[in-house]
Amino acid sequence: MIKRNTGFANLTAGYLFPEVARRRREFAEKNPQAKIISLGIGNTTEPLPEFIAKAMADYSMALATPEGYSGYGDEQGNSTLRAKIAETWYKGMASPEEVFISDGAKCDIARIQTLFGSKVKIAVQDPAYPVYVDGSVIVSAAGKNTGKGYKGVTYMPCTPENDFFPDLSKIKKNSLIYFCSPNNPTGACATKEQLKALVDFANSNGCIIIYDAAYREFIRDPKLPKTIFEIEGSRTCSIEINSFSKPAGFTGVRLGWSIVPMELKFADGTSVNRDWNRVMTTLFNGASNVVQAGGIACLEPEGLKAMKEVIDYYLVNGAKISETLRGENFKKAGVEVYYTGNSPYVWAKFPGLKSWDVFDKILKEANVVTTPGSGFGPAGESFLRFSSFGHQKDVNEACERLSKLSF
């Protein structure tokens, strides 16, 4: 018989979000009268902007005509969309040839492992989006679980004590560095000075940064960078991953992109862009033509305005959650709240308590779903992530329930 991929055997039991869903489902089955409100998984809730939805509907209906029918598209993506992304969101910092359209950031992060193989060293922010580590484990780049993390992964604690920016000296030479800003789950945003330090370190130590900018459109502080390519030197050490999921509500529609600069090289001088092009043309058949029509609409003036309005809606939710968690009942328990106003997530520490215990308490007593911080890495223990993605009436009701909790 064919042997099992040892990467799957090395995975810790249960991916975070399915475990959250399981506990919610079991609670609902035992308590059918409970009205559960989710402040947990970062799934968008508001309808697509009409202008954007109409662009997809029009394209879809045109497929029923000889003039409007289209078959396979370019695996790298619609040329108009690639050019619009480069022009609108990168403003000369990337060319259309460096933009690769995909079915979402998570898919790109998983596929990108094929570029580097099982021998590459991995460094991740801790806490971090689980797919960075789990994807590395599946391709056998992370080694075995020691009980305190994976042997082949350098965990970079990002905590209140270091202002959520890691000690770069812990990173080994020639590592793949996963970095997310605004961060999921902490919501922290790196400054230009911090990213310059990261870029300089990567260039000096043969590292490549996988920069996850999926939440860039939540940044409201004009002093904060929205892309790694605002930083001098980044084009020789960085790949950026992004998505329409959060800004456009495309979580179920699926559309993202990666930026791979022409200057980025492997140790032997081979172009990373060329190999990524091979990955995308070999292992992927291109994002849906219909969905890409929606992406083009997103980047029209009317689409950009509509997306901003939806993000502003979620930021109001985030501020409400942050205010609630700073209430007297949470203060008495010593709860520490971290919210920047530049992210959809509120990160809160419950000192002396286990993340899953607090999750269960809030689910049981307030019928509110959150996300345990320990599921994002060892440094996430005792924290919970609260998501601002939700209808405002539901978020307001959840906050009312939370305000009555005692610890």
Image: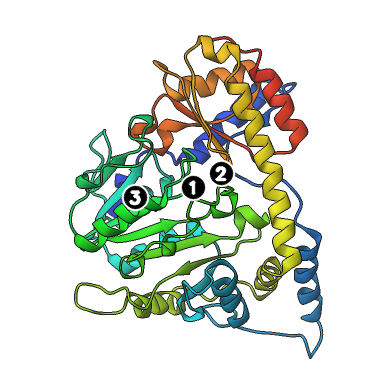
Left or right, 214 with respect to 198, comes to right
The answer to which of marks 1 and 2 sits earlier in the sequence is: 1
Q: Nearer the viewer, mark 3 or mark 1?
A: 1
- Residue 129, picture quadrant: top left
Seen in the image, is 122 located left or right of residue 395? Answer: left
CB-based contact (under 8 Å), mark 1 and mark 2: yes
* Residue at image coords 35%, 32%: 379
Mark 3 lies on residue: 8
**Circle 2 — which element?**
loop
State the residue position of label 2.
342
Q: Is residue 354 visible?
A: yes
Residue 38 in percent (x, y) is at 64, 33
Q: Crowding at label 2, few (<14), some or many (≥20) Cα neighbours within 10 Å?
A: many
Q: Earlier in the sequence, mark 3 or mark 1?
A: 3
Q: Amino acid at mark 3?
A: Phe
Could you tell me residue 3's position as x and y percent?
Answer: 27, 57
Q: Residue at x 37, y 35 (%)?
A: 163
- Residue underneath mark 1: 182
Image coordinates for residue 139, horizontal then vertical, percent: 31, 58
Is 345 on the left-hand or right-hand side of 131? right
**Position in image of residue 358 (x %, y %):** 50, 20
* Image quadrant occupied by the N terminus: bottom left
Residue 16 is labelled as none
Q: Amino acid under label 1?
A: Pro
